[in-house]
Each structure stands twice: as C-alpha cells, then as structure tokens.
Amino acid sequence: MNMVRAIFRRELASYFATPVAYVFIVIFLMLTGTFTFYLGGFFERGQADLRPFFNWHPWLYLFLVPAITMRLWAEERKAGTVELLMTLPVTPLQAVLGKFLAAWAFTGIALVLTFPIWVTVNYLGNPDNGVILAAYIGSLLMAGGFLAIGSCVSAFTRNQVIAFIIAVVVCFGFLLAGFPLVLDVFAAWAPQALVDAIASLSFLTHFADISRGVIDLRDLVYFALVIGTFLYANTIVLGWKQAD
Amino acid sequence: MLKTDGLTKRYGRHTVVDNLSIECGAGEVLGFLGPNGAGKSTTMKMLTGFVAPSAGTASICGHDVRTETRAAQARLGYLPEGAPLYAEMTPRSFLDFIADVRGLAGDTRRRRLGEVIERLHLEPVLGQTIDTLSKGFKRRVGLAQAILHDPDVLILDEPTDGLDPNQKHEVRELIRSMAADKLIVISTHILEEVGAVCTRAMIIADGRLLVDDTPDNLAARGDGSLDRVFRDVTLAGIPLAGEDAA
C-alpha cells in the first residue's frame, strides 16, 4: 500500500506541475457549463434538476478522459522513465493502481469543481439532492471505467497520439454498446446471447440508471468489473512489453 | 553478490546476449566493455529485472531476478542508460519519491537524503525543475537516485557518457569512494575509464563474453594499450561492427 501511495502522490503532483491540470479543469468546466445551459436547455426546461448537466458527461469523458490517460504509460515509455519505475521494487500492479488512482482523483477534483451548478439549481428551486449525489457518484464511476480503458491502451504504445485515438475508439464502443451502431455489427452473425451480452456492456445504459438516482448494485458491480478487468489487462501488457 | 548462469536474450533470431555466466562479489568494480550494440545495456536490463531473459538466470544477493524480483531490486541501485528522469519534477520532490518507494523513513531518510545531496552537490538546484537542468546535473540526480538507499549492488549504464572531463572525474571519484563494500557494475566504451576505476574488466562483443581479466593484465596483453586489446578482441569477433567503438 505504501508503494501505491508513493506513486499516487507523485502522479497527482505531476498533473499540477504542468499546465495539463489547469487546462483540463478549465476546459472541462467551460464545456459542462456551455452544454448544460445552451444545448441542455437548463433554464427552458423549467425543472429544478441536473439532468441537462449529467447527460453530457459521457460525451465529454469520451474525449477528455483519453486526453488524461494517453500520457500515463506512453510518456513513461517515450522518456525511458518506465525503466526507472519498473526497476524500483514496485510490482506492476502497484504501479498501475497508483497511476490509475491518481488519474481518478484528478477527475474527481474536476468534478467537484462543478459545484457552482449545484449551488445554482438549489438557489433556483428545490431539486432532489439525493438524485444529484447519485448522479455524481455514477459520473465518477463512469469516469473510472473510461480511465481504466485509457490507461490500458496507453501501455501498448510509446506514442501519445495513438494512445489517445485508440482510447477514444474503444471508449466509444463501450459507450454505445447497447445501440444499433455497435450491435448491428454483431447481430448479423453472432448468437443472440452474445449480442445481449454486448448490449449489457453499454456505459450509457448503466450510467442512465444511476443518474436517475437509482443506485443498483448491478451498476456498481458493472463499473467495478470494467475497471478491474482493464487494470488487470494493463499489468499484463506491461509484462509483455518487458519480455521483449 | 551477483551471479548469472547461461543468461541469454534473443530478439527473434537475433541473439543479443549469448550464454553469459559471471559471478562477482563485494569490493569489485566490474567494467563491461564493448562496442555499441554489444549487449551491455541488455545485460544490465536483465540484471535489474526490467527485461526478461530468454534463457538462463541472474541473481542479486541470492535473490533470483525473475522469481524474487522485488527482493533483488530492493538490494540494487540502477542508473539506466541516459539517466531518464521525470522532467517535470524538481530534484527534491524526485528524491523524496525515491525515498518513499525505497521505504526510507525518519532519521535514516533525512540522513541519507542529506548525504546524497551533499555528495553529488545537488544543493543549488534542488528546487529547479529537472527539465531545466544541465546534462551534468541530470546525471547527478540519476546517480543520487541510484545510491539513495545505500544498495549492496550498484549497476550504472554509461555513467559518464556525455559529461565534460571535470564531471567525468567527479563521477569516477564517486565510484571509487563507494567501491570498498559494494559491488559496482559499470558499462562504458571509454577505455581509460576502465583503467581509472575498475578492478575487473569484461569485454563483450556480439553478446558473447570474450575477455574477463584485470585492467592491468589487459593492458599488458596489448603492450600497455587497452585500445589495442579492445580492437584485437572485438574486431576478431565481429569484423564490421567495431569501427567507431574505440
């Protein structure tokens, strides 16, 4: 645990040692604000809730999360510091966890900084704050899923641009797994059971449940499994890269 | 303290390190010599547990680097080739991170950090980002990181490469001053370095160990010139690859 904490602290500090953190947070806040008020019709709806705010999160994460994760391993590989890190007495799992948790904590900070919108909706009306809290939790869990995917993808390459693009594509697939765009690819040839299984992988459907205020154990387990699976895959990819 | 048995690394059909068996103990300063691409760095990457061997074993202080990787890595300090560092950090925060990972705490931590910073003269640049440091300072930060936990085995991949003569001299002094109770392995293609700091020299070419002797004996073989032995040995092994090696 000490190793994970040491790596976590180093990683999190490194976000704020470069402009990355500030650029990300400012853009994230600007976009969530713009989307909520203009595209989401926050005022026009005349309802005191944050649906127009949370509805955009999956789409913002689709591009912003890979922008965070693309550097996680690709940059270490490019700079050669991965050799330094992996020859310290640290296991691959500890390194993966430390980096992932730092990225997740960073996303959490950005999410917490959206609090003015919560203040606004409470000033204007009487929203159900339980639903809002659930939606925040759901959003954070979904961000964790995206981050785990991005981290794993980043371990494959030393090129950050490639890491970014592949992560966006994989995340897009997971986001829309329940929709015809993805399902039609499989429906033609795969057995119905597989198509159903793929449909149940959709981030959007699981997030939609939570953002309505229903915290279902299945949704929590789902995101935990996505995160666990991709982080485990991440450690395996690191091992492969060391064997060659 | 360091033992390899039949250590081999193949990439596809190309054998980079070929059946290397060596054994060395405390007090030795072992110099890996060889032309570029001879397999020196790959050997060091295997010794430190970064690259998995294709065959054979290596152990540090009795810990096999594949099966007891963490225990082996805890006993060694390593300066990778080119001294890669986290560019956005300051030497102070970087060394703090290394101290965390090395499990140094309390008085020991303060003492070791103080000693290493003093020994490598890092005081003036502690608060500057590593990105902005000169090559000499970057190398010294890399060395500081390697010796921070006072390891039994120190593996330094081209520790003086790219440094000016004064800095080279300093690094050699540092190596000499630590040599008494440690095993230090350095790789280099600068021959004078071997005579200056090493107690034992190994010439490697094309992945094979060709010579294992003291620098004095080596020089005697080439009528007092290490250059000549190096050329004779490496060019006989591989006719084309040694041109710019000396």
Image (spheres, rainbow, N blue to C red):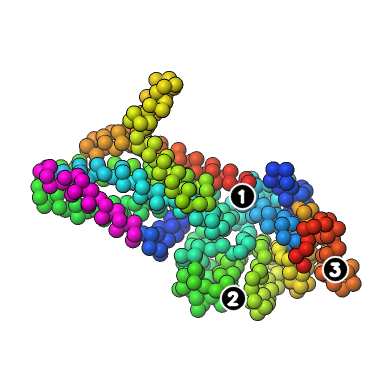
Secondary structure mostly seen in magenta is helix
Residue at 71% in and 63% down: B187
Check disc 1 and report its element: helix, strand or loop: helix
Task: Give the magenta part as a residue range.
Answer: A22-47
Q: Position of residue A156 (x, y in %)?
A: 52, 46
Return the mark for residue B119. 2
Left or right of residue B102: residue A129: left
Left or right of residue A79: residue B230: right
Q: In the rendered structure, which disc, 3 or 2, sits on the residue that comes first in sequence?
A: 2
Three-letter code for the amino acid on which mark 3 is drawn: Arg
Mark 3 falls within which chain? B
Three-letter code for the amino acid on which mark 1 is drawn: Thr
Residue that label 1 marks:
B69
Q: CA distance from mark 3 to mark 2?
A: 36 Å
Q: In the rendered structure, which disc, 3 or 1, sits on the residue that comes first in sequence?
A: 1
Report if residue B114 lies within the magenta region: no
Q: Residues within 10 Å of mark 2 (few under 14, many from 20)?
A: few
